[in-house]
Amino acid sequence: MKHQLEFEKPLFELQRKLDELKAHPEQHDLSVNFDEEIRLMERKLGEMQQEVYSNLNAWQRVQIARHPLRPYTLDYLKHAFTDFSELHGDRLYSDDRAVVGGFAKIGGQKVVVIGTQKGRDTKENILRNFGSAHPEGYRKALRLMQLAHKFNLPVITIIDTAGAYPGIGSEERHIGEAIAVNLREMMLLEVPIIAVVIGEGGSGGALGIGVADRVLILENAYYSVISPEGCAAILWKDRKAAPQAAEALKITASDLLELGLVDEIIAEPLGGAHQDTAAIAKSFSEAVLRHLRELSALPTGERMHQRYQKFRRHGKFDEPATA
């Protein structure tokens, strides 16, 4: 059975009944017109899906962003890119498998692509460290960005991480410094940079490859300085307040667009990106190529100035005047 989220259970139950009716109509009342019954049930299911997925709250979108069947970076590399040639290692310590990257093409355009990668099962999650990079992961990303600069290739980053790895080894090898250097160097990179948040965009772990000319986000992805559970534990002293925290944090795609923290929302298939990987990869590719064309048309100095101003504007807001 497909993985089902709590709010999806009524949909799955109706789908199960519909599948049973289609498979074994002879087990039901023979006086009923099953073709008509099936049509009515299909219409009801469609209406329920539209109602549920068109009115998702922040916590429900977080759950979809974390869905175990959601396409990961390697899925986009397979469906949206061609000729991917992976490069390994940071030339300093080791190869962090939570970060994948290398040369590729998208729509015939040569690029350097870098992304955080989660695992599908326990074995792969251990290999990928659950998508949480160590310092060497960010240093590998920086090495690839420097190659992009050398060969004058645009950089595409794909973000899907709960955050950078906070363990002792990570601290010993200076995770904060590795992320800070990436922030500085990405701001100074002369080639076009596009970042796409495809699932979780957690804290500095996401921002370490997220300084870009254009930041795009999938409809059900989120981008946040802290996880809803972490926020709930601090402010409400109870991780069960995560739904309330998710709402307060303003982390959904629509909130981020309104706040000017992202530049475009990429629509997902009804029910989430995991419902149709090919369709979301096509939308991903079209959006990236459109922004790439716009950025490539700008003079280098103007593009870098706009990038700088974009991030300088973050955090500025006006409070309504009080009487």
Image (cartoon, grey):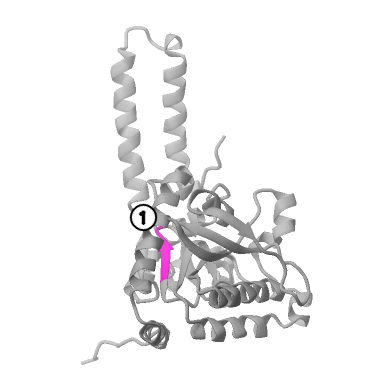
Q: Is residue 74 visible to the viewer in this orientation of the structure?
A: yes
* Camera-nearest residue between 118 and 227: 118
* Camera-nearest residue between 275 and 36: 275
In the rendered image, which quarter is residue 109 located in? bottom left
Q: Is residue 158 visible to the viewer in this orientation of the structure?
A: no
Q: Write down the region rendered in magenta.
A: 215-219
* Camera-nearest residue between 33 and 207: 207
What is the crowding at mark 1: few (fewer than 14 residues within 10 Å), some, or many (at least 20)?
A: some
Look at label 1 and name its amino acid: Ala
Farthest residue, direction left: 323
Q: Residue at x 58, y 62 (%)?
A: 103
Q: Residue at x 31, y 16 (%)?
A: 35
Q: Residue at x 53, y 81 (%)?
A: 186
Residue 181: give x, y in percent of width and height: 61, 85
Q: How many marks?
A: 1
Residue 76: give x, y in percent of width and height: 52, 53
Q: Which residue is mark 1?
A: 267
Residue 88: give x, y in percent of width and height: 70, 65
* Quadrant into which the C terminus falls: bottom left
Residue 290: give x, y in percent of width and height: 34, 63
* Quadrant into which the N terminus falls: top right
Q: Is residue 42 above or below residue 304?
A: above
In the rendered image, which quarter is residue 166 located in? bottom right
Q: Magenta segment, principal secondary structure?
A: strand
Magenta-drawn stretch contains 308: no
Q: Is residue 257 left or right of residue 155?
A: left
Local secondary structure at mark 1: loop
